Image (cartoon, rainbow, N blue to C red):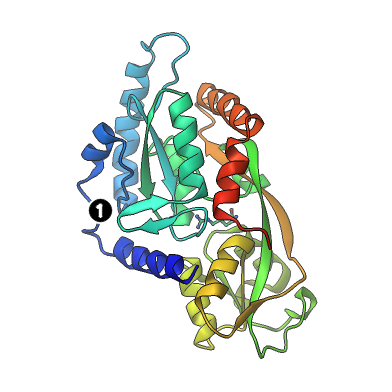
Amino acid sequence: MKKLAAVFLAGIMCASLAACGSGAADDAASTDTQTATEETVEETEETADDAAAADTEGETAEAGEVTTVTEGILTMGTNAAFPPYEYYEGDTVVGIDAEIAQAIAEKLGLSLEIVDMDFNSIITAVQSGKVDVGIAGMTVDPERLENVDFTDSYATGVQVVIVTEDSDIASVDDLEGKLIGTQEGTTGWDYCSTDYGDDMVIPYTNGATAVQALLDGKVDCVVIDQQPALSFVEANEGLKILETEYAVEDYAIAVSKDNTALRDAINTALNELIEDGTVQGILDKYITAE
Ligand code: ARG
């Protein structure tokens, strides 16, 4: 696990350099290679127009085929700083979500392309047609449902609290008056802001930077999903996860409200993959029983 986390941290550094991974999108289209591309808001807007054009062309596709942003490709938006769901191994995004997406793409006769972006940008990218799907250990929540559709759920998430081993925080009931580190735009950030006020909750770009702030004594705890929390605690001395849980949630795939055919096709594929044990097999590969 320590090795995995080190690779993952290297990945984050890589992703933060604009040059890293760029220009490889075309290769990915032809070879199935997963590609991580740094994105900007401007890019998102530009691509929305391209996507609208692609949609119109796609309508001539044969019956039964789904329309995607780029023909023949399922483009997945994610935030690859979230082990074991998505993280870097070298230049490649791997993890539970990458494998489930690959299996779904195969069933739909598409190749998979992965676009790495801020977690906060994923819903907009789905809405604007920069990507077809958001697959990012993303929790189904009412606010997101106003902007995108979700498929059926493929996994359960649990929000937990990471503290230092010597912390006086013993349970989730002790968070009042504490500075809480979270990942910006996540449900953990949302719950804590609602429960303790914006002033007490510091948003970080990703889980690793939030955990680093905890190690540096800048926050008193970090609220984040359980599986990444386990990776971060394994990778760093002196941290532990509280036994009491903050919230239990469903992870699902975000799809544009304008592409219900794609959502339905993914649901059919996903349910087959759940029924034949593929999804469980992928989860078991990355999540070892505690
Ligand atoms: N489950 C949480 C949410 O949906 C956190 C997901 C963060 N995912 C990521 N790939 N960084 O808000």
User: Dot 1, how many residues are within 10 Å of its Cα: few (below 14), some (14-19), or many (20+)?
Assistant: some
Q: Could you say which is closer to the camera, residue 245 or residue 149?
A: 245
* Quadrant where ligand 1 appears: bottom right
Q: Position of residue 201 (x, y in %)?
A: 60, 74
Q: Name the residue that disc number 1 marks.
A: 21
Quarter of the image for residue 7 reads bottom left
Q: Position of residue 72 (x, y in %)?
A: 34, 25
Q: Position of residue 203 (x, y in %)?
A: 52, 70
Residue at 66% in and 30% down: 275
Compared across the picture, whether 209 is left or right of 73 comes to right
In this rendering, does residue 138 appear at all? Answer: no
Residue at 59% in and 39% down: 279
Q: Position of residue 17 (x, y in %)?
A: 26, 64
Q: Could you say which is closer to the camera, residue 105 or residue 224?
A: 105
Quarter of the image for residue 118 reads bottom left
Quarter of the image for residue 166 reads bottom right
As helix, strand or loop, the secondary structure at mark 1 comes to loop
Q: Is 101 rendered above or below residue 55?
A: below
Q: Could you say which is closer to the camera, residue 42 or residue 7?
A: 7
Residue at 52% in and 76% down: 211
Which quarter of the rendered picture does the C terminus lie within? bottom right
Residue at 59% in and 42% down: 281
Q: Specify the amino acid type for callout 1.
A: Gly
In this rendering, does residue 10 appear at all? Answer: yes
Q: Is 230 rendered above or below residue 58?
A: below
